[in-house]
Image (spheres, rainbow, N blue to C red):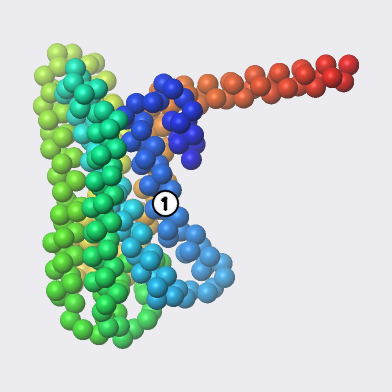
Amino acid sequence: MLILMLISTQSQLHSPMYFLLGNLSLVDICLTSITVPRALSSLLSRDLSISFHGCFIQLFLFHMVGNMDSFLLAIMALDRYAAICQPLHYTTIMRKTTCIRLLTSSWVIVSLHSTLFTIMTATLPYCGWVIHHYFCDVPALLLLSCTDTSAQQMVVFIEGSLIVMGPMLFILGSYLLIIRDVLKLRTSKSRQRTFSTCSSHLTVVIFFYTSIIFMYFRPSSLYSAANDRIISVVYSVITPMLNPFIYTLRNKEVKKAVKKIILCGRKRGQNWMKEAEEDED
């Protein structure tokens, strides 16, 4: 929320990179809000039940917002590629209208993906009603079905691969092109400075995709409820929590914007105190 406030109020942060970072912050807020409050409420109240409709609404929202995280990371990789490899054409490539179109298209794709997964799991017959997870997710629900779910597992693997692996391959391709151009720089100082602009984004990508791939793209024989609960915490709680720190602690412009707001607040406080003293006099 602090990042969103900074980006909206500080003119020096009105650029495509920070526009995308603001969207990533908003998506991370939504991602944690879908699962964490409900889980904490259950732990405190000891009421671990969830309604049938509530379960599948949670599943739909979680997959929609979680996959939007993936698409946003891909769009941010495009932004880094344009800034480093095509600096003279950056303003043309990363226009605001282009960013909005990319974001809108991504929301449409992830909404359709989530709708498919929700309908596919909601129409299955279930024999068990105890989900060994802290939120409703496809792998945990498929285990409760009375019928053979091999076809559904195949759909999850194939369609999920397109949605998740597509953006990941795009990110890898972008960074291969970035590395190729960075290695052409003459001085090591220039290479180090250029790589540092990508380090935050690359760190988030590694955290996010490592846990996602292990969670959804492995044989069902390797499924473990205990391990999956731990892994899901990484991409649904820890990664969204770390994203603001990763992007801000290494970002000079964000630090300057924070200092500017703090100084403005102090000045206003001092002026208010002076005015209060003058009124008393």
User: In the image, is 273 to the left or to the right of 102?
Assistant: right
Is 88 drawn above or below residue 100 in the view shown? above
At 11% across and 19% down in the image, what residue appears?
Answer: 184
Quarter of the image for the C terminus: give it. top right
Q: Nearer the viewer, residue 139 or 225?
A: 139
At 62% across and 24% down in the image, what residue appears?
Answer: 265
Question: Could you say where residue 124 lies in the image, as x and y percent from the top left?
Answer: 26, 79
Dot 1 crowding, Cα within 10 Å, few <14, some 14–19, many 20+: some
Is 163 drawn above or below residue 82 in the view shown? below
User: In the image, is 24 to the left or to the right of 272?
Assistant: left
Is 189 drawn above or below residue 156 in the view shown? above
Asked where in the image residue 145 lies, by quadrant, the reply is bottom left
Is 133 drawn above or below residue 1 in the view shown? below
Q: Can residue 136 be seen in this view?
A: no
Question: Could you say where residue 220 lies in the image, as x and y percent from the top left?
Answer: 19, 70
Under tag 1, what secondary structure?
helix
Q: Label 1 belongs to which residue? A: 30
At 59% across and 21% down in the image, what residue appears?
Answer: 264
The number of numbered discs placed on residues in the rendered structure image is 1
Residue furthest to the right: 281
